[in-house]
Image: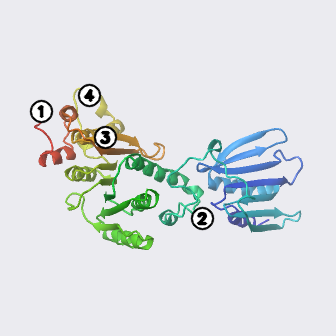
Amino acid sequence: MENIPEIVEKAFTEQIYKCVISNPVQKSEKYKKIELQFLDGLYHIEKHTATQVFHEKMTYEKAKGFIQDMLEKSYKNFHAWSSDKENSVQISKKGKVTLRTTHTKTQNAPKRLTSHNREKNYILQQGLYIEPLVDMGIFTKEGQVIQSMYDKYKQINRFIEIVDDEIKKQKKEEWHILDFGCGKSYLTFILYYYFTEIRKMKVKMTGLDLKKEVIEKCNAAAQKYGYKNLSFQVGDIGNFQYENKVDVVITLHACDTATDFALHNAICWNADMIFSVPCCQHELNGQIQSDAFSILTRYGIVKERMAALMTDTIRCNLLSYCGYKTQMVEFVAFDHTPKNIMIRAVKRKNGKRQKDLEEVQALMEEFHVSPTLYSLLEKSNHLSTKNT
């Protein structure tokens, strides 16, 4: 039985969505069979006695160790199903382990478990061949989510859903999109796929980043995918010049004040939509102080979080003052990262609201802060005279 770990490694891959452990070695074994079904990033375990079912949840790695332990000590049969294969393991009385793999037809394979038998209708559906998701290690070539990447799959869909909520309301023949601080551009490629393949819209996208090597790789990937209207440039967010009309500005995890420069550019360009996920808001944390509310600056962790929330609140109010309907929405679950806020701003038809600016000015005065976005807008004459 020395080869059981190797057999389990082959039989229980990350593509497996259901498996069954059965045929106990001893009749006295408590559980007659054990079923594992994948749902929402975890394996849901059902341990069947003669009269009861006991439930448990495991990660992929923990489930693999559990299966190995069961086959080494207590059971002789194991069956596992992926979208197109069935792996069958049998252990003889003498301990010989045999693995057989057969291709299954959809109608013969067990059904995949879904939440309350209703699978969430993601925009990026399983079964589609989305090449960037395959290269990212999120999809198999058959279009199935790799189990360990399910959380990332949900996060990407959440991003697309937030964008889609506004895009589907618009009637444009062509979209011009700028992605500031694009990095490796995982979401840029997915967004391009969303516009061209799902929404069937014309789009011209440009990604901007400071790292030349990253930009070269992104351009090569765009060419590989056949994304003709997606290109990448080396450049700085602060002084980037763009001559055409800008419909959408995206900035994901641009560090500290880089987000402010991106938002300022978007306002100057009169962009129709802005999607921004801020990161590393250090600026106000180094400035903030208050006599009346010193309790909020006394404890480091409270000061840090308050400064970050204050930064984003000021940004939202300034965007609102500049003519945008602005929201802060949860981008990913808080238990995954505390940096889970996305600013979504959509151009309004009605003009500026003075109260939004006055609230920012009052906050700045009370906590003695000078946020970069305010300074940039003041220099570019987007703000009215500051209150005295």
Q: Position of residue 279 (x, y in %)?
A: 34, 49
Q: First in sequence, mark 1 or 3: give its number.
A: 3
Mark nearer the viewer, 2 or 4? 2
* Residue highlighted by disc 4: 293
Helix, strand or loop under label 2? loop
Task: Give the mark, 4 or 1, whose residue is nearer the N terminus.
Answer: 4
| Proximity of marks 2 and 1: CB atoms separated by less than 8 Å | no
Residue position marked by numbered label 1 in the rendering: 387
Task: Identify the residue shown where x is 33% and y is 62%.
Answer: 205
SS class of the residue under badge 4? loop
Locate residue 33, reporting x and y percent.
80, 49
What is the three-letter code of the residue carrying label 2?
Glu
Mark toward the viewer: 4 or 3 = 3
Residue denoted by label 3: 326
Residue at 63%, 56% in the rendered image: 61
* Amino acid residing under circle 1: Asn
Mark in the foreground, 4 or 1: 1
Scheme by which the image is coloured:
rainbow
Is residue 370 shown above or below 216? above
- Foreground disc of the pair 1, 3: 3
Marks 4,1: beta carbons within 8 A: no
Q: Are marks 3 and 2 in contact (CB under 8 Å)?
A: no
